[in-house]
Amino acid sequence: MSARKIMVSVTEVSGDLHAANLVQAIKKIDPGIEFVGIGGEKMEQAGVEIRAKTVHMGTVGIIEGAKYYFSFLKIESKIKRILKEEHPDLVILVDSRDFNLRLARLARKLSIPTVYYIAPPLWAWNDWQTKRAARNITKIIAIFFLEAEIYRKAGANVSLVGYPLVDLVKPSMSKEETLQKFGLDAARPIIGLFPGSRGHEITRLLPLMLKAASKLDKNLKDIQFLLAEASPVFHNKIARIVTRSKISIKTVSGNPYNLMNISDLLIVTSGTATLEASLLGTPMIIVYKTSLSTWLIGQVLIKLPYIGLPNIIAAKRIVPELVGFRLTVSHLANTTLELLRDEEKLEQMRVELRKVTQKLGKPGAVDRAARVVVEMVNN
C-alpha cells in the first residue's frame, strides 16, 4: 500500500503557523502520512515538503493582490500538476480565500476531497458566496460557533473544533522578565504596534502608526513604544520604514505574546492578532486601510457592522475600530490618548475581552481538527 499523502495550501504568515500546528498534531496520531504543499518556514519545520514559498504573498483586496497575480498563476499551475500527477488523498486549505477556493474547485473536478481549516469568513459576505464555497469543499473545520452555524445552513459538512490558539497564546516570559529584557519601565505607558502580517498592510499602516506614535510622544513624554515583527520575511521592509520615521522604537521579533502581555494598549491591524490580544486580555485599537476600490467593493459585499474579530464575536463594539477614511494620524493619536487617560474604559475593555475568550471554545482545538483530518484520510 502506498503512503497516504496530504497537500497543504497556505499563502499567509498566520496560515503558516496554523498549518504547521495542524500537521504536527496529525503526525502524532498517524506518523505515516506524507505532506507536500505551499507555505512557509513553519510548515517546513513541521515536516511539509514545500514546493513554493508563498507566505509573503498574502493580500486583501483587488489592487493589493494585483502585483502577485502572475506569481499566483505560476504557483497555481504547479499545484495543478501536483494534483493531477501525484493525486494526494486529501487537500487541506488554510485561510487565503480567493486562491484556495479556486483550488477547491479544481480538486473537486479531480475527485480529491478537501478540508478547509481556518475557513474564509464568508459568514461576513453574501449568501451566494457561502453556498458556492459549501458546494466545493468536502469538509469545513470551523473554529467559531457563528462560522459553523452559517456554513451548515449553506449546506456544508462542518466539524466545529474551537479556536486553535486558545492552547498556544502564552507569554514565554513573565512581565518582569520581559520588561527587563527590553529595558522598559513598568511605571510608564507601553504601546504595542502590530502593523500586520501582509506586505501591503505594513506598507500602508506602519507609517501611519509611527506618525501617530510621534504625535503621542509629544503629548506624553514618558510613553514607550514596541513594534512587533510578524515574520523575518518583512524585517527589511519594517527596518526601512522605521528608519525613515526617526522615532525611537524597539522592534520585537519572535514571540509577540510577551509584547502583548506587557502593553497597556495595542494598536493592531485587523486579523488574527486581535484575538491573540483578546486571549491575553490586552486592550486595543483595531485599524485597517485598503485601496479605494477594495473599500468600495467591501461596502457593497460585506454585511457585518464590524471588521474586528473581538467585536464580531461579542456582537457589539467592545474595541474601537478605525477603518478606511476614519483612520487618520490625528484620529488614531487622539483615540489612543483618550484611552490611556481613562483607566475605567481600559478595564471595561478587559472585562469584555474575557467574555470573548470564553466563546472561543475549550483547549485542544488543534488535536480535534487533526482527528477529523486523519479520519477523512483513512476513510
Image (tube, helix red, strand yellow):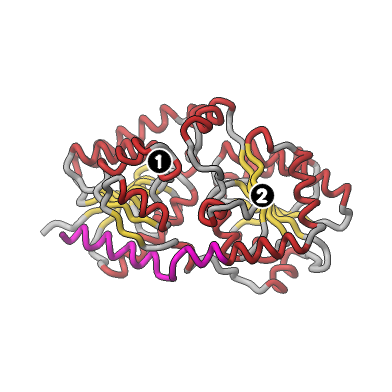
Q: Residue 378: where, in percent of width, then height?
A: 17, 61
In the image, is residue 40 part of the stretch drawn in magenta?
Answer: no
Q: Earlier in the sequence, mark 2 or mark 1?
A: 1
> Of helix, strand and loop, which mostly describes the magenta segment?
helix
For the record, the magenta segment spans 355-379
Q: In the rendered structure, which amino acid carries the disc numbered 1?
A: Arg
* Residue 8 visible within the image: no
Q: Residue 321: where, in percent of width, then height?
A: 64, 46
- On the image, numbered disc 2 is attached to which residue? 320
The reply to whether the C-beta atoms of the residues labelled 2 and 1 are less than 8 Å apart is no
- On the image, numbered disc 1 is attached to which residue? 97
Q: Residue 238: where, in percent of width, then height?
A: 65, 43
234 w.r.t. 204: above or below: below
> Residue at 72% across / 43% down in the picture?
209
SS state under label 2: loop
* Residue 319 or residue 9, whichever sits in front: 319
Q: In the rendered structure, which amino acid carries the disc numbered 2?
A: Pro
In the image, is residue 374 part of the stretch drawn in magenta?
Answer: yes
